[in-house]
């Protein structure tokens, strides 16, 4: 996708949100086969993800709600939860969403209390490492 196309998509989504369209409607309308809508793909690709230094045994990165566009952040959380699958991190059940070799998740707080979206490479997930015998 070109820079111009991304800018057009971003403007389109912003216009729809400002016009009062519900985020759920935006996400559902564009979620063909459960893939990230182009608007969300652009949002995810353009963010400055922060490496989680405190958990070096579990390489992943994250974005923080207050540092990004809040409406798009919420759209991403809704997408993860609507199109994800239930997995585990040790004993904790978590909803994961996988696309393009990356796995996304939140910690499960209600939407208005969710402040972090995490992601890691699919080979770095708990379930993959458990299956391969490479848990830390």
Image (tube, helix red, strand yellow):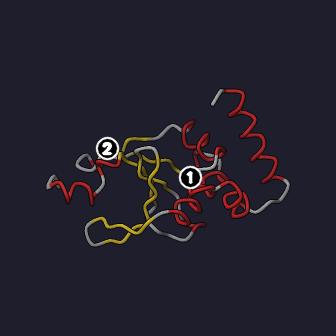
Q: Residue furthest top?
A: 3
> Measuring 72% from the left and 57% from the top, which residue is drawn there?
26
Quarter of the rendering containing residue 5: top right
- Residue 125 appears in which quarter of the rendering? bottom left
From the image, tell me which residue sits under label 2: 53
**Foreground disc of the pair 2, 1:** 1
Mark 2, Cα crowd under 10 Å, few <14 / some 14-19 / many 20+, is few
Quadrant for the N terminus, please: top right
Q: Work out whether mark 2 precedes mark 1 in sequence or the reverse, and give the earlier one.
A: 1
Q: Residue furthest left?
A: 133
Q: How many marks?
A: 2
Label 2 residue SS: helix
Residue 7 picture location, percent across and down: 72, 33
Q: Position of residue 131 (x, y in %)?
A: 20, 59
Residue that appears at 54% across and 38% down: 45
Pointer 1: residues within 10 angstroms few (<14), some, or many (20+)? some
Q: Secondary structure at mark 1?
A: loop
Q: Nearer the viewer, residue 107 or 67?
A: 107
For marks 2 and 1, give the CA distance: 29 Å
Rendering coords of residue 23 (x, y %): 71, 60
Q: What residue sits 52% from the left and 60% below the top? A: 80
- In the picture, measured across the screen, residue 51 lies left or right of residue 65, that is left
In this view, 9 is above or below 88: above
User: On the picture, is 20 further left or further right than 9?
Assistant: right
Query: Circle 1 is placed at which residue position?
Result: 35
Q: Which mark is residue 22?
A: none
Residue 64 placement, left or right of 118: right
């Amino acid at each position: 996708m070109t820079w111009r196309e991304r800018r057009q998509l971003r403007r389109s989504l912003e216009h729809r949100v400002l016009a009062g369209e519900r985020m759920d409607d935006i996400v559902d309308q564009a979620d063909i086969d459960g893939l990230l809508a182009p608007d969300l793909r652009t949002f995810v690709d353009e963010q400055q993800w922060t490496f989680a230094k405190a958990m070096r045994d579990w390489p992943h990165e994250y974005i923080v709600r207050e540092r990004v566009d809040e409406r798009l952040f919420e759209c991403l959380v809704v997408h993860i939860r609507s199109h994800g699958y239930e997995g585990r991190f040790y004993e904790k059940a978590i909803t994961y969403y996988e696309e393009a070799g990356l796995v996304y998740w939140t910690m499960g707080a209600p939407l208005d209390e969710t402040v972090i979206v995490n992601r890691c490479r699919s080979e770095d997930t708990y379930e993959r490492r458990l299956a391969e015998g490479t848990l830390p």
